[in-house]
Structure formats: structure tokens, C-alpha cells
Image (cartoon, rainbow, N blue to C red):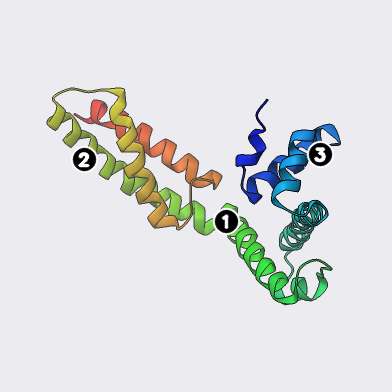
Amino acid sequence: MKNFYRNYNEEDLIVAYLSMVEHTGKINDEMREAISQKFDYNEFVKKANFRTALIKEKGRISFEVHNRVRKGDDFNVIESNISSDILTKKELEYFIIEKYYQFSSYKENNAIDKRTIYRSLLGILISTVIGILVLRDFVLITNEGSFLLLIPLYVVNYLVIKAITGKTRDNLIVFLAVFISVILSTVLPFILF
């Protein structure tokens, strides 16, 4: 039987090793042989175990940053209260900055406030008018009406509302505004004309 692990590079072997250890608790003889032929077995195991510890550590730090951002903590407070035995000071700082920005952006995007509501209402009005014109042009160009025309209509209305509100469709108000504007853009021409 051919040992197919011989064709694996180091990265693939580490992934296969970790997966096998996680699921079965041990590795088979073919994998042990492939690792021993290409690398020092003990060094390879250390590297794989470090990878697992690094993933867990980043998960822990990410969880801490997420909880502190949700509470509304300032970046400096978050950075000063999180430490790591695995990451270097520079790696930790970059990782905290990345996660802080990611979670802060998500929190800001999903915030529902008066500004978002008012801008979404304005977006409904403007995107409905633009949507009616776009739908009319699509029907004139294709000489037929189809439900497939709702896809570009949705995209156009979403882009207009996103530009006005500055938020994505992950925000519930923006999602509802796009949905309402697509319905209005589709139904109003039949009522008005």
C-alpha cells in the first residue's frame, strides 16, 4: 500500500496530523513514517502542538476583545488588560488592533439609532424612484417583465441605501429599507401607470 502522506508538504502534514489526533487521539503508522522521513518527529509534534496552542490563544484574546468592545471599553483599556504568554508583544498588539477594529466596525454597523432610521427612510424614497426608473429601463430593453429583474433592482436599491446610511444590509433597518424599496419599486409602476 502506497503511503500518500509522503506527497504532503509540511503545512498539509500538520493539518492532517492535528485532525487525526483530534478525532482518534493518535496517528497511524503511515503518517508517522511520512513525518519521520521528512522531519524530526519530535520537532514536528512540537510545531503542531504550538499551532494548536496559538489557535486557542488567539481565540481567547478574540473573545476578550469582543466582550470588552460590547461593554464599550476604550482601546487603551482593552490593550492594557490583555496579555499573552504565546504571542510576542508586537504580535499581541497587532492582533488586538485587528480584532478591536473588526468588532468595533461590526458594533457600529449594527447599531440602530435615529440617524440610521431617518437616513433609511430617505433611502427608501430615493431608491424607490431610482428603482422604478431602472426597472422601467430593464423592461424596455428586454421587452418583457421577469422576476429575474428583481435581482439587479435589489442591488441598485441596496447600493443607494448603503450610500445614504453608510451601513450594510447586516443592519436590520437597512435590510428592511432595501426590502421595502424593492417592493415599492416593483408595485408602484402598476398602481401609478
* SS for callout 1: loop
User: Could you say which quadrant of the image residue 85 lies in?
Assistant: bottom right
Asked if disc 3 and disc 1 are in contact, CB closer than 8 Å, the reply is: no
Camera-nearest residue between 175 and 26: 26
Mark linked to residue 21: 3
Counting residues from the start of the chain, the first of labels 2 and 3 encountered is 3
* SS for callout 3: helix
Q: Give, as a three-letter code, the residue at label 1.
A: Asp
User: Could you say which quadrant of the image residue 166 lies in?
Assistant: bottom left
Vertical placement of residue 89 versus 71, above or below: below
**12 relative position to 52: left or right:** left
Asked if disc 1 and disc 2 are in contact, CB closer than 8 Å, the reply is: no
**64 relative position to 133: left or right:** right
User: Could you say which quadrant of the image residue 101 lies in?
Assistant: bottom right
Q: Give, as a three-letter code, the residue at label 2.
A: Leu
Report, in whole angstroms, how far the alpha carbon at label 3 lies from the one at label 1: 48 Å
Camera-nearest residue between 34 and 167: 34
* SS for callout 2: helix
Tell me which residue sits at (65%, 69%) in the image.
97
Q: Which residue is mark 2?
A: 133
Name the spot of residue 38 as percent of width and height, x first.
69, 50
Vertical placement of residue 38 versus 74, above or below: above
Q: Residues within 10 Å of mark 2 (few under 14, many from 20)?
A: some
